[in-house]
Amino acid sequence: MIDVRIICTHDAAKLAETLTRLLEAEEHRVRLTTGRQAMGELQEARETNDAVLLIWSPDARSQSYMLEWARQIEATRVIDLTLTEDWPRLGRKVSAIDFSQWRGERSDRNPAWRMLNERLRGVTRALNPPKPPPKYAALALGMASAAAMVGALVLRVNDAGMPRIDELTTQDQLAAEDPSTGLGGPVLAVEPAAALDFEMLPVRNFPDAPLIREASATSQLAALPVLRDYELRDPTMLERLNAFNPLRNTNREDQR
């Protein structure tokens, strides 16, 4: 983007304000000067690299300060905008852009706005030409390419003398599986077999012992004594008091 100065008379102030707003929206830095005060800024503008927009309205043709700006500013920096066919050409090689039918449209489909943007890009290229490529850029690029090729060749030679990755993996796996190497490997949690899986339980024979069926047919179980008044717990205080009740003992003897 480039800095832009707009110089006009009062009858083109409305157009100049619209251009200022739209050019600032295009990220240009715009300075608008209207009327005779523009004459006081002429000397400063000659020492800068701003693009100068001169709006040639019907009143601007007869104003001396407009003519002075057109004469003293370099032609490569000046962009003429005209609102009338009778504008002072002053030996210009490039004709002015007709803005008489422009209604504030900021679109490339509008020929006036499109031509203005093209002129601004031309002034930018004229004031800020692209820098030439560095003198030793090609030499530096060639040296960098050569260094890259040498590095790739060295890496390829070193890779050729190194064992392959799959061979190293196989050797490491065999070394890890060999218990004599002392290298760690994957842990397999397997429960060892029990000793009873390989040996039969010893069975002891008793030849003199009678069979259970024959013994059960002849033998009888001893009669167990009948236990009475068997206490599963200690008597409570109420139960001990009831033991002294004479009526309670009489009822027990009658029940018997």
Image (spheres, helix red, strand yellow):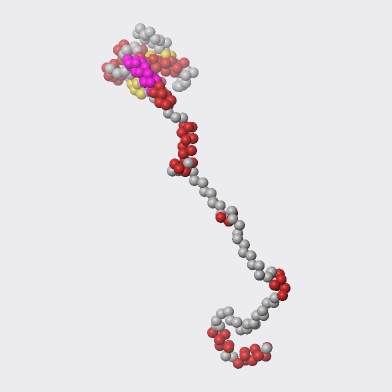
Q: On the picture, is 61 further left or further right than 107? A: left
202 above or below 35?
below
The x, y position of residue 168, in whole percent, is 46, 33
Question: What secondary structure prevails in the magenta region?
Answer: helix
Tell me the quarter of the image containing the N terminus: top left
Q: Which residues are magenta?
A: 132-152
Residue 127 lies in what quarter of the image? Answer: top left
Inspect this view and state whether residue 13 appears.
no
Name the foreground residue: 120 vs 67.
Answer: 120
Q: Residue, x 56% and y 88% (percent of image)?
A: 241
Q: Quadrant of the C terminus?
A: bottom right
In percent of width and height, residue 147 lies at 36, 21
Q: Count every numbered label the image shows and give the total.
A: 0
Residue lying furthest right in this view?
217
User: Which residue is rendered at x = 49% and y = 35% of the image?
Assistant: 170
Q: Quadrant of residue 144?
A: top left
248 above or below 38? below
Q: Percent x, y for residue 226?
A: 65, 82
The residue at 66%/70% (across/down) is 208
Q: Is residue 138 magenta?
A: yes
The question of residue 7 being in magenta is answered with no
Q: Let me know if residue 109 appears in the view.
A: yes
Q: Quadrant of residue 88?
A: top left
Pick the front one: 118 or 181: 181
Q: Position of residue 7 (x, y in %)?
A: 34, 18
46 shown above or below 212: above
